[in-house]
Image (cartoon, helix red, strand yellow):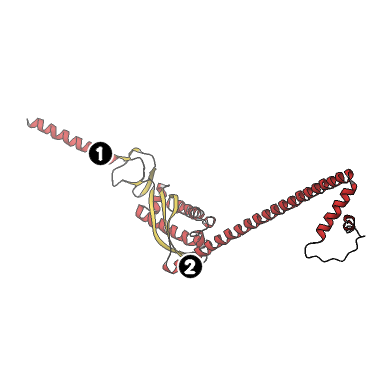
Amino acid sequence: MVKKMSIVKWLFALIVAAIIGFFGFVFKVNEGECAVVTRFGAVRAELTQAGMYLRLPWPFEDVRIQDARKRYLDSGYLETLTHDKKNVIMQTYAIWSIQDPLKYYTSVGDSALAETYLSDLITNAKNGIMGSYDLSTLVSMEEDNIKIGEIEETMLAEIQPHAAQQYGIQIHELRIKRVGLPATNVQSVFGQMQADRQKYIDQLLAEGERDAQIIRSESDAEAAAIVAQGRESAAAINAETEREVASIYAGAHSQDPQLYEFLRKLAALENSVDENTVMIITTDTPPFDVLEEGN
């Protein structure tokens, strides 16, 4: 019985030793992680693929496993100066990950320090780049003036080489999250917005006046064309009427010239006098000779 208990103890001790030995000589890198293996402080291996790896137990070798997934960094509210000497408060965010595990381990070591360095890089880039842009590129009533996308691309292009070369970090995105204004600049921004709006109103009024002038010119041209056409039609009608009258007169004259002449003289007399007319005439002068003929 004692011998059996001794065997069990030895088996248990072997199992414990095997487990300790396994975890002492083997380690695992999960998906989305990277690792740096050091031997007596010197780097022995850089691992970026998930899997099981062999190692010497501590204190001979040490394994530093880091999260290689993308991470979010918020810069907070930082005040900067624009090219037109306006203070503006900007909040940015960055999406970053470890690009070079060895350089990240030797220069940074942990995520808290990495984010501190990245925040400093972003702040310096923000201050330098915004010094080349006016406030209207961030806040404006004119869509064409807004250049937020261009500013973001410029900041990312300036920061990324430094982050990769110095810290082994890749910045995937750098965006402007929010733009604020100090109280001293609010009135200035309102004035700029009013000026932009007034410019837009003036443009609309000018376009309206231009269109109205075009409509008036077209209307005047159409009216002149209608009047000219009416006069032309009236002249044609008058000419046709006179022709028909002349034809009627000619027909009447050909049928009875004496009667025609008599009637024409009577018409001339009727058109020459009225009830208040006083005339001294001789009856031998046409058309008054018809008065003597009547006697």
Instruction: Return the mark for residue 273.
Output: none
Q: Amino acid at mark 1?
A: Gly
Residue 143 is situated, as x and y percent measured from the top left of the image, at 52, 55
Q: Which residue is mark 1?
A: 21
Of 249 and 295, nearer the camera is 295
Foreground pick, 122 / 200: 200
Find residue 275 and report its image quarter: bottom right
Residue 161: percent from left, percent from top: 48, 52
Give me the residue at 13% from left, 32% from top. 8
What residue appears at the point 23 percent right and 36 percent down from the top-left corner?
18
**In-image side of 69 versus 259 (left or right):** left
At x 53%, y 64%, the residue is 195
Near mark 1 (Cα within 10 A), the count class, few <14, some 14-19 or many ≥20, is few
> Toward the viewer: 238 or 256?
256
Q: Of all residues shown, which one is farthest toward the left?
A: 1
Q: Amino acid at mark 2?
A: Ser
Residue tagged 2: 188
